[in-house]
Amino acid sequence: WDKSIRRQCNLQKKLSVNLEDHDVRYVDLSNLQQLRQCVPEAESIDMRRNLITKLDTFVGLSCLSETLRELNLSHNRLNVSSFGTISALVDAKTGFHRATFPNLTQLYLNNVASDAFKPWQFVYILAKNGCLPQL
């Protein structure tokens, strides 16, 4: 039993990070780097039902890009207004780019639509600019 408990508590081997319903408003790069150190093999991040509105929160996910296969952002009130233009949205330095989600195969954006955010337009823009090569 003790061996089983130790195995369950070993974050180095965890593949999924669940942050659902944790009132997360913003995730900065330092927090993502810390997450990467704690859970280096994370393939799935579930951020459903949080308080995230700014898409620039997710640009830093490129530090998890090697292993990240699934990202769930459903039930957040996302907004693209943090990027002034489409060019800024896909800028290699400040926005989404090829290295952000190179291995992502599943992206969940259920119930995130608003007047300022249309999820399928967002996915289309990312796909057209090579940001989602596996999707």
Image: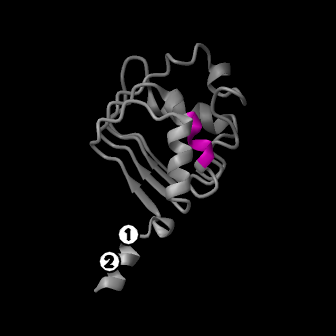
Could you tell me how far apart the alpha carbons at marks 2 and 1 are, in whole angstroms? 6 Å
Classify residue 100 by image quadrant: top right
Q: Residue at x 35, y 47 (%)?
A: 19
Asked if disc 2 and disc 1 are in contact, CB closer than 8 Å, the reply is yes
Region rendered in magenta: 59-63
Residue 9, numbered label: 1
**SS under mark 1:** loop
Residue wearing tag 2 = 5
Picture mark count: 2
Callout 2 secondary element:
helix
Density class for disc 2 (Cα within 10 Å; few <14, some 14-19, many ≥20) is: few
Q: Of the residues shown, which amino acid type is indicated by label 1?
A: Cys
Q: Does 96 appear in magenta?
A: no
Judge whether 23 appears above or below 65 on screen: above
Residue occupying the far top of the picture: 84
Q: 113 above or below 74?
A: above
Q: Main secondary structure of the magenta part?
A: helix
**The disc label shown at residue 58, or none:** none
Q: Nearer the viewer, residue 115 or 10?
A: 10
* Residue 121 in sight from this viewpoint: no
Across and down, in percent, residue 128 comes to 66, 35
Q: Which residue is drawn at the image coordinates 58% and 34% (left, top)? A: 59
**In the rendered view, does 118 fall on the left or right side of 49?**
right
Q: Nearer the viewer, residue 3 or 53?
A: 3
